[in-house]
């Protein structure tokens, strides 16, 4: 897909997965896969993930759904392409810094991009990104972790855990808190939970009574930073000392 901020044109050089068959060019109307994805992105930003469908995209483009199938197999592939288009907006960290700082900056960049596009985080869970933009960024991250002297298996498990954390956190951010018939943001939900935890009988729930404030305190940003720091420290514990080269 297009729109890779870090390396324009590089995405086309990444081979597509074997299960994504090549599409024949349509002779019916001048429609491209990129145009379809950009249209899906407009619908997503305007109305959310639930509004994105082959029919809604075709309607926005002023054509019928059948014409889209020349370029995109189905809705599931459309969401894959849409997600990769968005991942293409994530800036790859540049400059000489520690690997820990690079990984943290990368995680913050992903979160920032996902937050810009409404509830797109909903389609990140249980979806393994294999688009060109995602592959380029994963290749960079794997390289950073390998250069840090982290064993291969720890890299594989750590990268998976980090991806799940970021996606799940962004999913929660994009999902209104619901409890006791009320809907609100995470901060409002924290207030309700603190009130509930504090109301529990201390003789039956002594730990909730003691930790009612601690369990619900902190901003969303602080919680994200804390979780990210735990992941990086866990990876750091596996890192082998790197030998400096002799001049």
Image: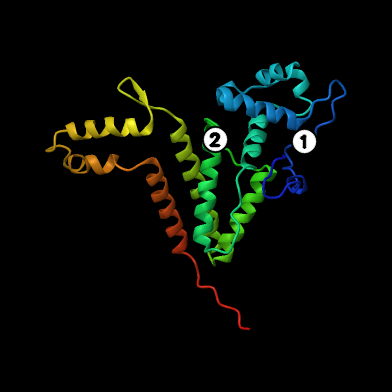
Can you say whether 247 is above or below 128 in the image?
A: below
Q: CA distance from mark 1 to mark 2?
A: 31 Å
Q: Of helix, strand and loop, which one carries label 1?
A: loop
Q: Of helix, strand and loop, which one carries label 2?
A: helix
Q: Quadrant of residue 81?
A: top right
Q: Quadrant of residue 147?
A: bottom right
Q: Residue furthest left?
A: 203
Specify the color scheme: rainbow
Whole-percent x, y for residue 22 in the image: 80, 36
Q: Quadrant of the C terminus?
A: bottom right
Between residue 66 and residue 115, name the one nearer to us: 115
137 displayed left or right of 67: left
For the point 55% across and 77% down, which residue is it? 243
For the point 65% across and 39% down, which residue is it? 84
Whole-percent x, y for residue 204 in the image: 15, 37
Residue 125 seen in the figure: no
Tag 1 residue: 21
Q: Quadrant of residue 197?
A: top left
For the point 58% across and 60% down, which residue is it? 144
Whole-percent x, y for residue 66 in the image: 76, 18
The numbered disc on residue 242 is none
Tag 2 residue: 116
11 displayed left or right of 119: right
Q: Quadrant of the N terminus?
A: top right
Can you say whether 60 is above or below 6 in the image?
A: above
Residue 70 seen in the figure: yes
For the point 63% across and 55% down, which residue is it? 140
């Amino acid at each position: 897909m297009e729109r890779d901020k870090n390396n324009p044109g590089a995405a086309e050089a990444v081979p597509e997965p074997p299960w994504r068959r090549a599409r024949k060019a349509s002779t019916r109307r001048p429609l491209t896969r990129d145009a379809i994805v950009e249209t899906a992105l407009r619908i997503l930003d305007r109305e959310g993930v639930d509004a994105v469908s082959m029919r809604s995209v075709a309607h926005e483009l002023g054509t019928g759904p059948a014409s889209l199938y020349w370029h995109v197999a189905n809705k599931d592939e459309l969401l894959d392409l849409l997600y990769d288009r968005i991942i293409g907006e994530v800036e790859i960290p540049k400059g000489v810094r520690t690997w820990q700082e690079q990984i943290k900056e990368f995680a913050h960049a992903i979160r920032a991009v996902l937050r810009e596009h409404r509830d797109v985080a909903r389609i990140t869970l249980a979806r393994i990104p294999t688009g060109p933009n995602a592959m380029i960024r994963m290749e960079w991250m794997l390289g950073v972790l390998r250069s840090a002297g982290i064993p291969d298996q720890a890299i594989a498990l750590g990268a998976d855990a980090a991806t799940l954390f970021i996606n799940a956190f962004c999913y929660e951010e994009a999902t209104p808190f619901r409890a006791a018939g009320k809907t609100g943001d995470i901060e409002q939900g924290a207030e309700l939970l603190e009130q509930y935890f504090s109301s529990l009988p201390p003789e039956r729930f002594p730990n909730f009574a003691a930790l009612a404030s601690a369990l619900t305190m902190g901003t969303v940003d602080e919680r994200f930073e804390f979780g990210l720091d735990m992941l990086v420290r866990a990876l750091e514990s596996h890192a082998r000392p790197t030998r400096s080269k002799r001049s």
